Amino acid sequence: MTHPDFIPLDFIEYPPDEMQRRAEAFYAELSRRRTVREFSDRPVPRALIETCLLVAGTAPNGANLQPWHFVAVADLAIKRQIREAAEALRKHAFGRGGVHPGFPGANRAYGVPGTGGTPASGSS
């Protein structure tokens, strides 16, 4: 069995104050993320999608096997079918309310009856 050539880590060590600044900026950016189930119909440039997929492919994984497959779907009817199938799977996997019974905080956030919560803005 042949092994791909080992690529050494190109490590850059930053001064502590720059590491802190970069960490805070990264946290600020990532803390803006939210689950979204309604999407824009605006087109996304193919080159941007390809660059995002290149970035996703750099994620750490066991034995550097890259065990994932990506598909970019442009057809609106197929996107709708994928969304409907994903929602059906979510509801089947997590129960009638669509959230896991082991996560009461999530149940409250989604407004599942009997948990005292109300649906958060943007949730469906």
Image (cartoon, grey):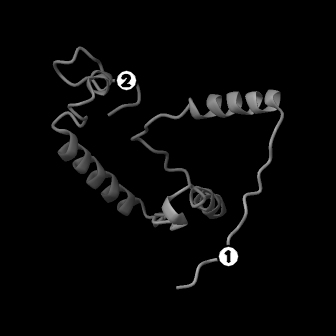
Residue 95: which quarter of the image?
A: top left
Along the line of sight, the residue nearer the viewer: 20 or 13: 13
Amino acid marked by disc 1 = Asp
Q: Nearer the viewer, residue 75 or 63?
A: 63
Which residue is located at x 64 percent, y 28 percent?
Answer: 28
Provide residue 84's location: percent of width, then percent of height.
Answer: 28, 52
The CA span between labels 1 and 2 is 49 Å
- Give residue 5's mark: 1
Q: Quadrant of the C terminus?
A: top left
Task: Identify which amino acid the numbered label 2 is placed on.
Answer: Ala
- Label 1 residue SS: loop
Residue sitting at x 45%, y 66%: 67
Q: Of callouts 1 and 2, which one flags the residue occurring earlier in the amino acid sequence?
A: 1
Q: Could you tell me which residue is drawn at 62 percent across and 77 percent down?
A: 4
Q: Single out the residue that lies furthest toward the bottom.
A: 1
Q: Is residue 64 left or right of residue 111?
A: right
Q: Is residue 42 left or right of residue 87?
A: right
Quarter of the figure with residue 98 = top left
Image position of 12 with respect to 73: above or below: above
Q: Residues within 10 Å of mark 1 (few under 14, many from 20)?
A: few
Q: For mark 2, does the 10 Å Cα neighbourhood hold few (<14), some (14 to 19), or many (20 or more) residues?
A: few
Which label was assigned to residue 77?
none
Q: Quadrant of residue 76?
A: bottom left
* Residue bearing the label numbered 2: 120
Would you say the residues marked 1 and 2 are in contact, meaning their CB atoms lie under 8 Å apart? no
Considering depth in this image, is 94 or 8 the residue closer to the camera? Answer: 8
